[in-house]
Amino acid sequence: MNQLTSMNQLSNLGSKPSLKQLVYENLQNMIIRGELEPGSKLTEDELAQSMNISRAPIREALNMLERDGFTKIIPRKGAIVAEVTVKDARDIWKCRLALEPFAAREALPNIPREEMEAALAHLKELETHSYSFKDYVDSDLEVHALYTKHLDNEYLKSILHNLKAHSTRVRWVKEAKNAHSARSYDTILEHKAIVEAFLSGDGDLVYIRVREHLQKSADRLLDLED
């Protein structure tokens, strides 16, 4: 059998929606936002019934979530939402400190100026609005997406995407219950400094501003554990 014949016998997966991916994304978002709290039990039967699908994609999605660190599968007991520890937070921010300043500098030439200007405008609006933890987190994601989205390095982009998912989860689990408008205002100022550095076109300044923000973010987060 030649290679062309073999290729023709492959299934056309592109025409089929991936249920396991949809389940994965749905559960991951609920875990990140704290709607499924650490320690929550995730049973295949209940999930299959609530989503009106078979157990197979549920099982695959739970395995994917365990692979990415969002769940733990305990033999003969099933899956539970993974806990978030102080060590998790420290390890995540160490990785972010090592990778994100470099990533931001690398992505700078690819970021459309209109996206930078829009992010800065949103930050200025946020300063005048009444405090909302969700709006604060969404703004954080928008600023960091400026460089993660426009990176021309798919390997680094994939790593940062997973790190950002975990760091957002840590924020919702650890910060939401201790949300403080003053802390959020400090972050908004740091984000403005990052976007202004992007707008200046100075890659070294971008590196410095992103690193400063991440270090202060780590300090604020770990201060909640004291």
Image (cartoon, rainbow, N blue to C red):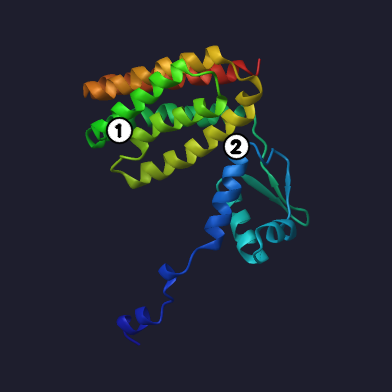
Coordinates of residue 161 in the picture (x, y in percent): 44, 41
**Quadrant of the rendered image containing residue 214:** top left
Q: Which residue is mark 2?
A: 33
Type of the residue with mark 1 = Glu
Count of picture labels: 2
Q: Counting residues from the N terminus, which is met first, the one under dot 1 or under dot 2? A: 2
* Image quadrant where residue 128 sits: top left
Question: Who is closer to the viewer here, 41 or 135?
Answer: 135
In the image, what residue occupies the spot 71% across and 61% down?
49
Disc 1: which residue: 115
Q: Position of residue 202 (x, y in %)?
A: 22, 22
Q: Secondary structure at mark 1?
A: helix
Q: Is residue 149 above or below residue 122?
A: below
Asked whether the viewer can see residue 96, the reply is yes
172 and 63: which is toward the camera: 172
Residue 102 falls in image quadrant: top left
* Residue shown at the point (34%, 47%) measured from the top left: 154
Residue drawn at the location 78% of the way across and 57% of the way down: 76
Quadrant showing the N terminus = bottom left
Q: Residues within 10 Å of mark 1 (few under 14, many from 20)?
A: some
User: What residue sits 65% from the left and 58% below the top?
Assistant: 51
- Residue 62 appears at what percent x and percent y? 63, 54
Q: CA distance from mark 1 to mark 2?
A: 25 Å
Question: Which secondary structure lies at badge 2?
Answer: loop
